[in-house]
Image (cartoon, coloured by chain):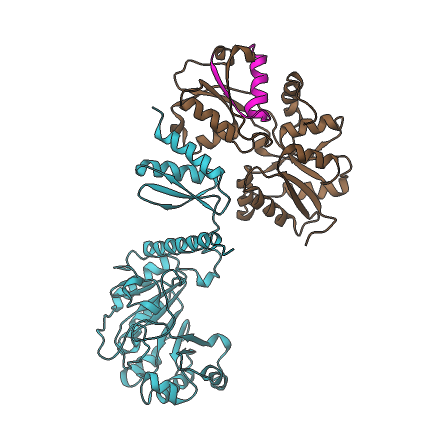
């Protein structure tokens, strides 16, 4: 009786020798020990175990370039970390990707937890923090979270800039300017479209908030979310952005995603989105645009964050590699 | 865009991976001082004829194709470079562990599995080494696998067929090239604990880039220099190097062909096919 590992190795050599680079061969295996043998063999011979099935391994002929290395540095999973500090909001936008509203369960991440999250993020190599909600400034003590992050990570807060009154205004003015950006939502150059989706009177308050933040010396980015009814809004926004003195990198225009409250919009999935790791009080999500979609949840807890980011990277690699293989083996003629 | 000035390299299409290998090498040369293109042949005989006819500048030849080219050119052909793995090629005689076979002399009266008749490592050289050890073909029960004739053993198929014969007990010992044996060892020594190396040959040289004197130094030198600069540490280079089975290109060791020259002479191998 010949050893099963020898038989497996012979089958690996025969099958892979007959497989063109970039294509795969399915090799029967029995048990974890044979999977280990196949993995050792593939690593030593410049091939790749693409998938481990219960009774087979799928071997890709050759090595695969890391799909993450092909992304711009600031788009690689783990470069940015998103944090939903809360889910409640003073507005109830009809396209909100996480169905935030004044009635939403707040699901708050405390200042203490934010401090620990930032510590783990820095250790995991995160370069930039994005805080969103809900409306983050619904939290009176949001500044404590910012004071925890700003010494370590450039931080952007996504806000509607409508609640900076009273104590919130006092705390706003006291915030550091260095490393802090406010990304303020504004969906059109005039009130009609903006107010249609975000509530009557919200346009004027957003404009006032943008001007206040600029006047207070904060770095401001203005972000528009456009649906099917946007018409010429994007063109008209350009003039408004110009009048506010916003540089190109201070303008964001994105489309509505079919998530949360939005009945229509771009469909997104883990396979179709480059992940941007997103922490919430409920766990970690593939991307902030889908932080209430159960299919986009990647972990029940953000700690240990480094392991969660590694898992997201691995899954993204698998999606990309699988996609590349399928693409290269699906000629129509 | 191909140019008539490109160095034209011939290679044999022994597997589907020959295309990505040579497209990768061609791309690597694209912006060099010696851009190249390649032509694929279905067997080494056709490629040698093409080199001699001047259809290509360089032929990526097996050791057997090299010796035949040397014979046809009265020794004027030049070897430009080889893989590092070509310089330490060996033939192993592999038997079941515990078989008691421990040298070539012990193979008298045994079933000896050999590969394709034009394979240096799996047929021509093993027969030569056996004969040199006093074991003639008539002394053995030969189990022949002419699995990839024309490819000079490049596919590895006949080596694997010979090994299978040992595993399935239709042969006592198999002659295999070191590339096949090392591929088996890649998963760890314990993988091959059922097998034993009965005998290992001296090192000999395997493939090389062969050129005729008409491919002058002005064109050859920049091409060879750029070839030698392929770097294992560069992921894009490494992808190609791994597919072709080397870590670095090296100057060819011509002394390493001496055993094959003698083997082909002793066996009366024809200069032409």
Quadrant of the rendering where the N terminus of chain B is positioned: bottom right
Q: Residue at x 56, y 27 (%)?
A: B89
Question: In the image shown, does A70 or B206 lie closer to the viewer?
Answer: B206
Q: Which residues are magenta?
A: B110-135
Letter of the cyan chain:
A
Quarter-wise, where is residue B154 in the image? Answer: top right
Quarter-wise, where is residue B48 in the image? Answer: top right
Is A64 placed left or right of B57 in the picture? left
Residue B133 magenta? yes
Is A262 placed left or right of A330 in the picture? left
View extreme (front): residue? A333
Whole-percent x and y of residue A207? 39, 87
Letter of the brown chain:
B
Whole-percent x and y of residue A8? 38, 33
Q: Residue at x 56, y 22 (%)?
A: B123
Residue B211: in sight, yes or no? no
């Amino acid at each position: 009786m010949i050893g099963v590992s020898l038989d497996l190795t012979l089958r690996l050599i025969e099958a892979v020798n007959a497989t063109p680079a970039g294509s795969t061969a399915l090799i029967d295996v029995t048990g974890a020990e044979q999977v280990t043998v196949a993995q050792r063999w593939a690593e030593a011979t410049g091939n790749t175990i693409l998938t481990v099935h219960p009774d087979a391994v799928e071997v890709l002929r050759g090595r695969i370039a890391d799909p993450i290395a092909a992304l711009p540095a600031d788009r690689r999973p783990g470069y940015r970390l998103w944090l939903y500090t809360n889910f409640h909001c003073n507005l109830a936008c009809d396209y909100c990707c996480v169905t935030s509203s004044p009635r939403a369960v707040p699901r708050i991440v405390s200042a203490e937890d934010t401090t620990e999250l930032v510590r783990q993020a820095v250790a995991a190599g995160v370069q930039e923090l994005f805080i969103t909600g809900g409306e983050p400034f619904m939290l009176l003590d949001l500044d404590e979270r910012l004071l925890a992050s700003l010494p370590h990570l450039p931080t952007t807060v996504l806000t509607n800039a409508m609640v900076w009154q009273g104590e919130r205004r006092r705390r706003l003015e006291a915030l550091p300017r260095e490393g802090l950006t406010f990304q303020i939502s504004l969906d059109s150059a005039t009130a009609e479209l903006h107010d249609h989706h975000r509530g009557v009177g919200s346009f004027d308050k957003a404009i006032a908030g943008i001007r206040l933040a600029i006047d207070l010396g904060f770095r401001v980015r203005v972000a528009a979310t456009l649906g099917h009814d946007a018409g010429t809004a994007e063109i008209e926004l350009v003039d408004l952005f110009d009048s506010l003195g916003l540089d190109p990198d201070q303008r964001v225009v994105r489309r509505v995603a079919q998530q949360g409250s939005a009945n229509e919009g771009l469909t997104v999935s883990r396979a179709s989105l480059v992940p941007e790791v997103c922490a919430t009080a409920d766990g970690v999500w593939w991307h902030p645009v889908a932080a209430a979609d159960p299919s986009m949840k990647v972990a029940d807890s953000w700690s240990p964050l480094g392991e969660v980011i590694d898992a997201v990277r691995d899954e993204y690699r698998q999606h990309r590699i699988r996609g590349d293989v399928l693409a290269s083996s699906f000629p129509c003629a | 865009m191909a140019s008539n000035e490109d160095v034209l390299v011939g290679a044999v299409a022994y597997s589907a991976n020959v295309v990505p290998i040579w497209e990768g090498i061609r791309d690597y040369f694209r912006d060099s001082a010696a851009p190249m293109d390649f032509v694929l042949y279905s067997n080494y005989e056709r490629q040698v004829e093409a080199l001699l006819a001047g259809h290509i500048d360089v032929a990526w030849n097996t050791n057997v194709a090299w010796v035949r080219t040397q014979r046809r050119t009265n020794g004027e052909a030049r070897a430009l470079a080889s893989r590092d793995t070509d310089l330490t090629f060996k033939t192993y005689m592999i038997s079941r562990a515990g078989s008691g076979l421990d040298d070539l002399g012990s193979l008298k009266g045994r079933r000896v599995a050999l590969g394709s008749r034009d394979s240096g490592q799996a047929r021509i050289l093993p027969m030569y080494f056996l004969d040199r050890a006093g074991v003639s073909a008539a002394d053995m029960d030969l189990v022949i696998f002419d699995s990839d004739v024309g490819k000079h053993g490049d596919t590895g198929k006949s080596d694997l067929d010979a090994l299978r014969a040992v595993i399935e007990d239709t042969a006592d010992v198999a002659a295999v090239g070191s590339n096949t044996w090392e591929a088996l060892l890649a998963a760890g020594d314990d993988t091959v604990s059922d097998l034993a190396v009965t005998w290992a040959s001296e090192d000999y040289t395997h493939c090389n880039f062969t050129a005729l004197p008409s491919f002058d130094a002005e064109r050859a030198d920049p091409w060879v220099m750029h070839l030698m600069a392929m770097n294992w540490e560069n992921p894009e280079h490494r992808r190609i190097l791994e597919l072709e089975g080397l870590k670095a290109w090296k100057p060819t060791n011509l002394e390493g062909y001496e055993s094959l020259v003698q083997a082909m002479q002793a066996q009366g191998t024809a200069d032409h096919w």
